Amino acid sequence: MTTPALSIDGLSIDYVVGAGRFHAVSDVSLDVESGHVVGIVGETGCGKSTLAQAIPRLLPEPPATIGGGRILFQGVDLVKVPRWKMPTIRGTGISMIFQEPLNSLNPAFRIYDQVAEAVHVRRARESRPGGLVRADGAPFDYSKLPAPRAGDTIAGHFIPGGVAQDAVHRRQVERAAGGTPSEVREVVLDYLKLVRINDPETILDLYPHELSGGMRQRIMIAMALCEKPSLLIADEPTSALDVTIQAQVLTLMKELIREVNTTILFISHDLGVIAETADELGVMYAGKLVEFGPVAEVFASPRHPYTKALLKAAPTRYKTDGPLLSIAGSVPNLSRPPPGCRFHPRCPIARPQCTVEPGPPLAPVAGAAPNHKSACYFPEEVPGIP
Amino acid sequence: MATSGAVANFPPRASAGQSARQVYVGLRTFYRVLKANPLTFVGFVVVAILCIAALLMVVAPHVLAPYGPDQITTAYNQGPSGAHPFGTDGLGLDIYSETLYALPLDLEIAFAIAGAAMIGGGVLGLIAGYWDRPGSASGALSVVIMRITDIFLAFPSLILALAIAVSLGRGVWQLIVAILLTWWPYYVRLVRGETLAVKHLPYVSAARAAGVTDGRIVLRHILRNVLEPVVVYFTLDIGTVLVTLSTIGFVGLGVAYPSTAEWGSMISYYQGSGLITAYPWTVLGPGLAIFVTVLAFSLLGDGLRDILDPRSRRVLGGTGTGAITVATPPEAPLPPPAPAESEDLPGSEAPTAV
């Protein structure tokens, strides 16, 4: 039994606005296994981006406040880590790709300067006395790395959940003491090639406004990858791009997920994206995780009425007749969520029991895969909903 | 192996050839921006002439000024002529020479005040803007900085400067201190506002997510993007400082003329002794000098934004590395590097929603 790369336990996040409290995330528990890709889906405003940004503690606090719970990463509870220590965990520990590629690069600096900054963050940490600390707490022994072979690439040498052990990387570390700009340039070029940027030599000297949205998102991905994070959080990396560019970036992401073999938390509202990339899938509704399980099983036989309704409402290219299905009712106001199960006002199988606080806990479903959990009192009835 | 060499090596220094080219491209861009804005061009040329003249007046005053400082000529109260372009006064001083002798001092005072206000106010503004989380120690510091700033802003700056100038007495340093004490709060306000706007932009979040420390984010990402409006404001401010400086001199609280030449004090001296009605040309020299200098800096400031913004810079500069040089379609994927396993990638078609 391995320890998960990330373990969220009973996490609650509120936004305090004036006298009101907006319960954006309520009592979410989630394990992300090392080397797995975990997808989180849910409609707009269900708290998935809040959850994603809370993990590396990037939420503005205030107005956000972590009401309770733990975020365990490499044996450390990130909720309790002092604010000034967080930068040492971000980047090399947890890195993030944002949903706004158009504004995520500093307009005043050339691409090279920005990617090189990420490379330097990594190097500076490695060249500290004691170097980087592995996920299991042991110091990292660079002498035990395999010798470089011809054709070695950066990708393919990631160790899930730990620190990358690749030949190119070792050379980087050896040079770290006296690395010259041209070597940094080589590393930056390697990563731009990794994200399939054509003519990287030219791109290096351009400013962000001279690149398209898709190219900028690739640069962001390169920046996140060159720090070799133990956990990569992708917060809707494609939602700001148009459809054809989305497809290209997603294809790239899918290839990179296989190549770098790292742990990824993939936030999206696009079920198709999750279906193709993720190993496990979590479904969020109104700030709660309502279902979690292996992606194939959740798609094939959802055990929460909301998941079932969400899957039915998703458009397919084969359905050409009639309007798209929608879920009756509307999303609850999260400053005064309905008592009990938050989905009960819209649920076809709701009973009086569902309105009693606290709502149904996220519990394993009988007769399903062992890690398939549903926050419904009647998961066995869900397959029967028309 | 474990040294801090990698840290000291940042940012990566360009090679000699690269930097020479960068300087060339920078100068060419600067020239093109100036050419595109004729008024900025005029401002730049006049500012350049004024600065060179000021330098000459310090190094070799006789190149420009026909008479020495405080040199009494035999001509008294003469109107403008070939020998005395701005005329002479009752003491026989050549006003043209005196105006030139005041040039370095006036520019020095204006730059010193605006520069010190920009640096001091800018640092305070960055601190107050970036570390403003309520409830923390740094948030309390931010509140203290802003309240003190507000107290200073509550007084009309000219009146406050006059009051301080009165209490300190006459002299160059007293004048600088008096104006500076009223000048820095505007920069705190400006920089804090810009910092607040910039720090919530996605690229600052992205830098934080990449593990960049707060100090670096402020010094690198925020400062660089705040700099643009601040430098423009600074340039325009040189003119404003000069006017304030002259006003204080005009009411007789600045530098003591004729022992030290300063434009505002010169005007004050000539009109104060009632000579302005009989010999109006006496105020022409210093008045014209103030007018030209303030106008030149204002014109230059307006065009500086274009020079500092990478977007307009590229358009106007048209460097050889522009995006147009990407001849091949940039989205064409390269072959994946050394695939570890050669299984088919699932779903190679464009993904769509289920």
Image (cartoon, rainbow, N blue to C red):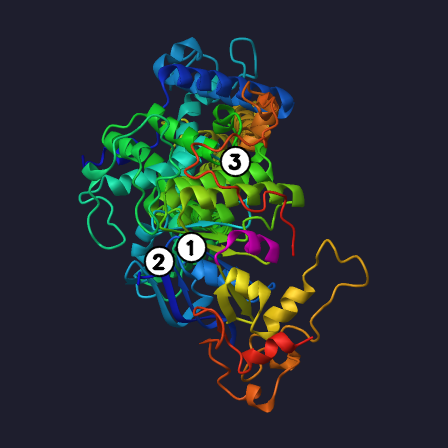
Majority secondary structure of magenta residues: helix
Left or right of A310, for residue A357:
left
Q: Residue at x 35, y 35 (%)?
A: B172
Q: Which chain does the numbered disc 1 sit on? A: A
Q: Read off the residue under disc 2.
A: A5
Identity of the amino acid at label 1? Answer: His
- Magenta segment, which residues? A271-279
Q: Read off the residue under disc 1.
A: A36
Give the quadrant of the C terminus of chain B.
bottom right
Which-is-in-front pick, marks 1 and 3? 1
Q: Read off the residue under disc 3.
A: B232
Identity of the amino acid at label 2? Answer: Ala
Figure disc tally: 3
Counting from the top left corner in percent of width and height, residue A159 is at 33, 46
The secondary structure type at the circle numbered 1 is loop
- Nearest the camera: B12 or A154? A154
Asked if residue B120 shows in the view, the reply is no
Left or right of B49, for residue A155:
left
Q: Which chain does the numbered disc 3 sit on? A: B
Which-is-in-front pick, marks 2 and 3? 2
How many neighbours does mark 1 have within 10 angstroms: few (below 14), some (14-19), or many (20 or more)? many
Q: Which chain does the numbered disc 2 sit on? A: A
